[in-house]
């Protein structure tokens, strides 16, 4: 098991809302991506570095549960959680809260590790797993 949690903040821009002033549902996928990229930075790596080492991580699956609407100018907290040691896939769980601490949305993404040289699935690289080691139980 693992226990890695990263938090980052995003302010809702006007263009991210619909006619009712609520965050457009498709933008939550972008917020998940922001949370995931910042979580990787907290682990001391970036997607760019992974790609330079010949490994890509495309999304294989995404699940979202919308609970309450986010609104224009809300400061959102994106909590990104990794609770499983990755194998050939990695699961990121997300919780998005508003400034009052109300849970607005939760979900997860499953990303596959793909070797660039042959575009085939591969195990999580050892150098990647080493970054996660401090968070394993």
Image (cartoon, grey):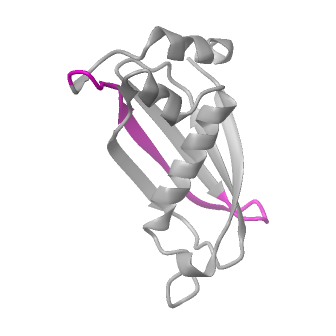
121, above or below 78, in the image: above
Relative depth, front residue between 70 and 123: 123
Residue farthest bottom in this picture? 19
Q: Quadrant of residue 40?
A: top right
Please state which of residues 87 and 107 is positioned toward the viewer in this rendering.
Answer: 87
Q: Is residue 106 visible?
A: no
Q: Is residue 130 magenta?
A: no
Q: Residue at x 46, y 57 (%)?
A: 29
Q: Examine the rendered structure and indicate whether residue 61 appears above or below residue 54.
A: below
Where is residue 97 shown, x and y percent of the image? 68, 59
Where is residue 106 drawn, in percent x and y? 53, 53
Q: Would you say 119 lies left or right of 113 here?
A: left
How far across and how far down the image is residue 23, in percent?
55, 74
Vertical relation: 17 (above or below) 55: below
Q: Residue at x 58, y 70 (%)?
A: 68
- Residue 102 is a magenta residue: yes
The segment highlighted magenta reads 97-118
């Amino acid at each position: 098991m693992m226990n890695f949690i990263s938090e980052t903040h995003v302010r809702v821009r006007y263009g991210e809302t619909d006619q009712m002033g609520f965050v457009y549902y498709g933008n939550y996928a972008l917020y998940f991506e922001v949370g995931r990229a910042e979580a990787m930075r907290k682990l001391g790596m970036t997607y760019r570095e992974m790609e330079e080492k010949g490994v890509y991580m495309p999304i294989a699956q995404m699940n979202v549960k919308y609970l309450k609407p986010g609104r224009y100018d809300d400061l959102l907290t994106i909590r990104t959680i990794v609770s499983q040691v990755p194998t050939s896939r990695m699961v990121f769980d997300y919780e998005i809260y508003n400034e009052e601490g109300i849970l607005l949305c939760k979900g997860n993404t499953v990303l596959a590790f793909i070797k660039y040289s042959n575009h085939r699935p591969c195990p999580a690289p050892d150098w990647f797993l080493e970054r996660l080691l401090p968070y394993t139980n």
